[in-house]
Image (cartoon, rainbow, N blue to C red):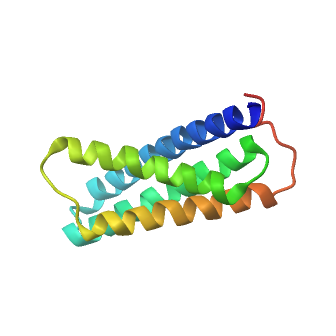
Amino acid sequence: MSDKSRLVKAVAVGAICSMLSCIILTSILAAVMLSTGMLGSELTNWITTAIMGLGSLVGGFVAAKINKGAGIPVGGMTGLAVFVVSALASLSRGASGVTSMAIIKLAASVLLAIVGGILGIREKKGTNYGRF
């Protein structure tokens, strides 16, 4: 039972870290847009997809470090959790429906979180992440 609770805790903390890194990257994007001017709508969609993917990479890395193993499933669940929270926030506005970009964001989020999970397992330095 402790393995399941550690898994849930790892995915939750990884998703929170992922969202925080997405907020930081979005703030950087906003600062760049303020200094250079507005970007095109299509370019902004791809940049936000990249931001979501990079945030998921960070979240998968942290979740795998906390779980101390099973990088692929933990990363995948973290990426899926990040996508679900993002999709629910987007759908709650009611302004836009599900488009093909949502599938691309799902793939980017899950795949990069899996990569983060693998990188989190492969790094053999001392960890202080597992003390939750």
- Percent x, y of residue 101: 29, 67
Quarter that holds the C terminus = top right
Total number of numbered discs in the rendering:
0
Residue at 17% x, 57% y is: 97
Q: Residue furthest left?
A: 95
Residue at 75% x, 37% y is: 3
6, 115: nearer the viewer:
6
Q: Quadrant of residue 57?
A: bottom right
Relative to residue 12, is residue 37 depicted above or below?
Answer: below
Q: Residue furthest front?
A: 1
Residue at 78% x, 29% y is: 131
Whether residue 25 is visible, yes or no, is no
- Percent x, y of residue 128: 80, 36
Whether residue 16 is visible, yes or no, is yes
131, 97: nearer the viewer:
97
The answer to whether 64 appears left or right of 87 in the picture is: right
Residue at 79% x, 46% y is: 68
Quarter that holds the N terminus = top right
The answer to whether 28 appears left or right of 36 in the picture is: right
- Percent x, y of residue 87: 32, 50
- Percent x, y of residue 90: 25, 48
